[in-house]
Amino acid sequence: MVSKSRQILAFVITAILLIALFCLAVNTGSLQVNLPQLLSGLFVAYDPTVATIYDLRFPRILIALLGGAAVAVSGALLQAVLRNPLADPGIIGISSGASFAAIIIVAFFPMLFFFTPLFAFLGGIIAFALVYGLSWKGGFSPLRIILIGVAVNAMFTGLLQAFNSGTGNVYEGAANIVNANISMKTWDDFTTLFVWVVIGLLLSLTIMQRCNLLALEDKTARSLGVRVNRSRLIISLIAVLLASISTSIIGPISFLGLIVPHIARLLVGSNHKVLIPYCMILGAFILLLTDTVGRVIVAPNEISAAVVMAVVGGPFFIALLCGTRRKYVG
């Protein structure tokens, strides 16, 4: 049981680090400004350097913050629904399903581009339904969910590769639009992401108690008046919404939804009333951190945040998988 003071300390320290990282990210690159110049250029008088930073860096930074928060909360919700510490929207195929649906819409129905997030949501639902349906066998086995999720992920990835090869890479540009580096995003992308992610995050705050109750055995939860299946469905839809919308804008980010909830539980405990709000802050911090590291480590070139997360998250996932294998069979 994590003490209240430790939880408050974790929130305060992470928030301070997030603000400091935001300031660092704004000044990372060939153009740099001090704080008074930045504030003056934003709110007082036009400054060409500040205007350039505002147009190029601010959308990227804010999209990283929103996307990180969304994917992290999605991972926490999926782990609650599936009772599986290894659940992650990237690992179990939700992100690849959403990405595939978004690419098909961009390629063949460009007039529906504005509705790409909705179709990505539909693709995520299909992927999750496949994983959920194929994994259920009188209950959930953590390893079975992961194995089937990996298979579903591979299926959608293979479909996308077959689509690109079968069309002679004519529609490869559509894939580049969906899976582009965060640096390619604009204020329009931020606006779209902001609307849907804020809706998803607000909805996640309304089902925190349900997540706590799902940690109980189904019979116990039902005896307390909980509609278990209905709660699972609602929480799953919110999780898929957050993961799919983020994927349609920033592309798949593997392991973020796996790493953040585990770190958050170590710092603030397993109570979802505290865990979910903290995942928002920590997820935003970690994705912005990986994006900033990718900008700095090989400057003036860049490494995408997805690649950095894959390098860091791979060993983390292997360690968790080894630990889970000792506890569960099949």
Image: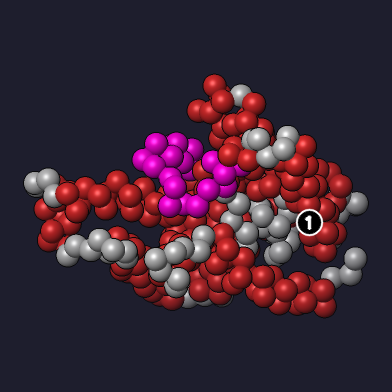
Q: Is residue 179 above or below residue 83?
A: above
Residue range of the region highlighted in magenta in the rendering: 175-200
> Going 39% across and 66% down the picture, which residue do you hit?
300
Quarter of the figure with the N terminus = bottom right
Residue at the front extreme of this rendering: 168
Badge 1 marks a residue whose secondary structure is: helix
Q: Nearer the viewer, residue 151 or 233?
A: 151
Quarter of the figure with the C terminus = bottom right
Q: Nearer the viewer, residue 217 or 248?
A: 248
> Going 13% across and 59% down the picture, which residue do you hit?
37
Measured as percent of width and height from the top left, residue 18 is found at: 36, 65
* 51 relative position to 82: left or right: left
Measured as percent of width and height from the top left, residue 101 is found at: 67, 36
- The secondary structure that most of the magenta stretch takes on is helix
Label 1 crowd bin: few (<14), some (14–19), many (20+), radius 10 Å: some
* 295 relative position to 108: left or right: left
Colour convention:
secondary structure
Whether residue 324 appears in this view of the structure is yes
How many numbered discs? 1
Q: Which residue is mark 1?
A: 150
- Is residue 191 inside the magenta stretch? yes
Whether residue 76 appears in this view of the structure is no
Q: In which quarter of the view is residue 145 placed? A: bottom right
